[in-house]
């Protein structure tokens, strides 16, 4: 794919379950694999975003409301739209890789790595994924 597919780039999903969702580009696989014969991308995103918390809530509710659930998936390039945003979330490519879909033990490690990085960014006070990126019809 072209120049715009670099690791850390924010993309919009145009198909399947996470339609209109924002994902972070991890790795491009241009040659294809046995599972996906065409070129595709490995992306990480957030399934459940943390909710807003009022200042007067107790600590238990704050912990419960600030949970993050992440996912790692492969998408074909025509199902992704790259806007002009990028993030400084360095996902570990030794853990988040295309082999995680073949082994059940590795299947949980990829989303855990993504969850840790997204949670670190959330705790610093920055937006996890930019809100300015919207898909309007």
Image (cartoon, helix red, strand yellow):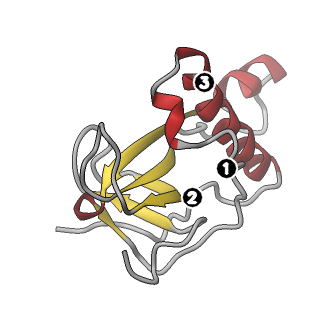
**Residue 126 visible in the current orientation:** yes
Estimate the x, y position of residue 101 in percent, counting from the top left: 46, 29
Estimate the x, y position of residue 130 in percent, counting from the top left: 55, 65
Q: Nearer the viewer, mark 1 or mark 2?
A: 1
- In the rendered structure, find residue 106 and report the number of the disc placed on it: 3
135 to the left or right of 105: left
- Between residue 111 and residue 92, name the one nearer to us: 92
Position of residue 114 relative to residue 129, above or below, is: above
- Between residue 81 and residue 123, name the one nearer to us: 81
Return the disc, 1 or 3, that comes first in the chain's sequence.
1
- In the rendered structure, find residue 93 and report the number of the disc placed on it: 1
> Which residue is tagged 2?
129
Q: CA distance from mark 1 to mark 3?
A: 13 Å
For disc 3, the neighbor class at 10 Å (few under 14, some 14 to 19, many from 20) is some
Q: Are marks 1 and 2 in contact (CB under 8 Å)?
A: no
Position of residue 81 relative to residue 101, above or below, is: below
Q: Secondary structure at mark 1?
A: loop
- Which quadrant holds the N terminus? bottom left
Q: CA distance from mark 1 to mark 2?
A: 20 Å
37 to the left or right of 104: left
Return the disc, 1 or 2, that comes first in the chain's sequence.
1
């Amino acid at each position: 794919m072209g120049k715009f597919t670099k690791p850390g780039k924010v993309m919009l999903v145009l198909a399947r379950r996470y339609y209109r969702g924002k994902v972070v580009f991890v790795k491009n696989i241009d040659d294809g694999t046995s599972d996906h014969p065409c070129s595709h991308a490995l992306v990480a995103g957030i399934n459940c975003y943390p909710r807003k918390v009022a200042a007067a809530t107790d600590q238990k509710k704050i912990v419960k409301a600030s949970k993050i659930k992440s996912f790692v998936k492969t998408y074909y390039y025509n199902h992704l739209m790259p806007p002009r945003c990028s993030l400084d979330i360095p996902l570990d490519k030794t853990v988040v890789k295309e082999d995680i879909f073949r082994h059940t033990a590795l299947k949980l490690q990829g989303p855990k790595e993504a969850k840790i990085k997204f949670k670190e960014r959330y705790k610093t006070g920055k937006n996890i994924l930019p809100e300015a990126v919207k898909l309007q019809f």
